[in-house]
Image: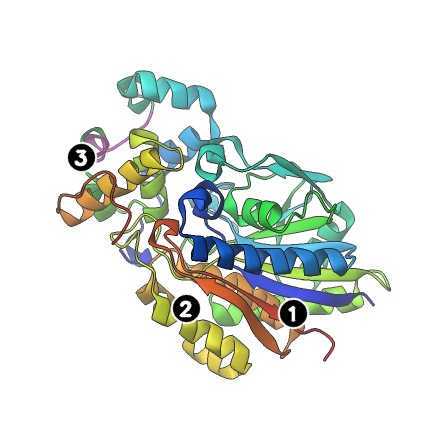
Amino acid sequence: MAFEQVDKTLVTHDLVQDLKWDADLRAQFEADQTSVLDCYALKPEERTAIETGDFRKLYEMGLHPYLGGQLARLIYGNAAGPDATRAVNRLIASLTGEERPDDRTTT
Amino acid sequence: MADIVLSVAASHAPGLAGLYSGAPEDTKAEVDKMYGTMGAEITAADLDVLILVGNDHLANSRVLEYPNFLVGMAAEHTGPYEWFKPWLNCRDYTLEGRPEVAEALISGMARRGVQFFGRRENLCYDDNLSIPTVLCDLDTNDVPVVPVLMNCNVPPIPDQRQCYAVGEALGDIIRNDLPNGMRVGLFGSGGLSHEPGGKRYFFIDQEFDHWFMDMLEEGDHDKLLNEATPERMEESGAGGTAELFAWFVVLGAIGNQPCSRLGYTAYDNFKCGVGAVRWQMGS
């Protein structure tokens, strides 16, 4: 995805950055994703894409890929090793439409 | 007149700490050699301050209000930032800051027509500062640091020529605004090829990485400025490879000095080409 496709006004950017900066919000997101998403003025298709892990749609809407990678970690796991590898593979699978095993560590 | 007595540049990636133990032995040896050499040379240089220029990974400012350059003005810099700890899996650290140098950079840039922002509170540091710190032992060797975080991610980003020009202003500030006899080191932190969050997350463009480091060793800055464009960076890794513009700030500050590479390795799971260079100062 090219830089030029980034929509700086996309509300998901605020969501991801807030989750990075606020441990309490992150804990709430892990326990009850809906209650956190309710606090943000997300477009209906933007919210659905987050809820379904549809990163391709989010990127089409202008999500910054770096924050896309971090959103994947927030959803699928953040720790170095298997957690983060699963997050990366599910992100790539969503973007490419190709299935990938969760533990793959190559292109 | 202060002196730039040391200049290096190197990649950072969370995996260099968090995934190091699972890397192949030859990769670990190359990483140890690169960062160990830099760490030893930084310590031996007896610096009064190390100015570390590296990209901010959207960790300190909202996308809607993103500064191109943000200086860490705190008296102490601590890290890694809490959310990044599981990625990095490295030790916590505290670095001595140099607020008076940070202030001199901000005001000196303003006098030269360059917008630098600053923050007196501790910034959020991920691999940009944490990897150089723990792999080069900046904390345990008491190296005072002023971090300059830059925008390599939020369009429009400052390109290679703008970063080189900022570097020229930085060099002018060091030579003319900082105290006589101050020993200054420069560290460019970022790159090489990688595409965080993209379809090619695991891809490392080794051909690009060697092409870029070859050009540094050739020392032809005109060629670098003509060919290492944002478009070329994007081809080799969207949203990641352009971190190399931090190296252009160092290049602008020091001018044409002999450059040699300290090493290079490409391990898929690091998700980033990893290399380091050193410039021979005072030649």
Residue where numbered disc 3 is placed:
A45
Residue where numbered disc 1 is placed:
B253
Residue B187 lies in what quarter of the image? Answer: bottom right
Q: Residue furthest front?
A: B25
Considering the numbered disc 2 on the image, is that residue within a helix, a strand or a loop?
A: helix
Numbered disc 3: what chain? A
In this rendering, would A7 be left or right of B279? left
Q: Position of residue B272 (x, y in %)?
A: 40, 55
Above or below A61: residue B32: below
User: What residue is rendered at 84% in x and 60% in y?
Assistant: B179
What amino acid type should be assigned to the residue bearing mark 1?
A: Ala
Q: Which mark is residue B209?
A: 2
Does the stretch in magenta take in A44? yes
Q: Are marks 3 and 2 in contact (CB under 8 Å)?
A: no
Viewer-nearest residue: A27 or B67: A27
Q: Position of residue B227 (x, y in %)?
A: 41, 78
Q: Position of residue B97 (x, y in %)?
A: 72, 44
Does the stretch in magenta take in B242? no
| Badge 2 and badge 1 in a common chain | yes
Q: Callout 2: few (<14), some (14-19), or many (20+) C-alpha neighbours within 10 Å?
A: many
Does residue B72 show up?
yes
- Residue range in magenta is A40-50
Q: Callout 3: few (<14), some (14-19), or many (20+) C-alpha neighbours within 10 Å?
A: few
Residue A102 lies in what quarter of the image? Answer: top left
- Nearer the observer: mark 3 or 2; the answer is 2
Viewer-nearest residue: B207 or B114: B207
Cα separation between marks 3 and 1: 47 Å
What amino acid type should be assigned to the residue bearing mark 3?
A: Glu
Predominant SS along the magenta part: helix
Does residue B122 show up?
no
Viewer-nearest residue: B276 or B1: B276
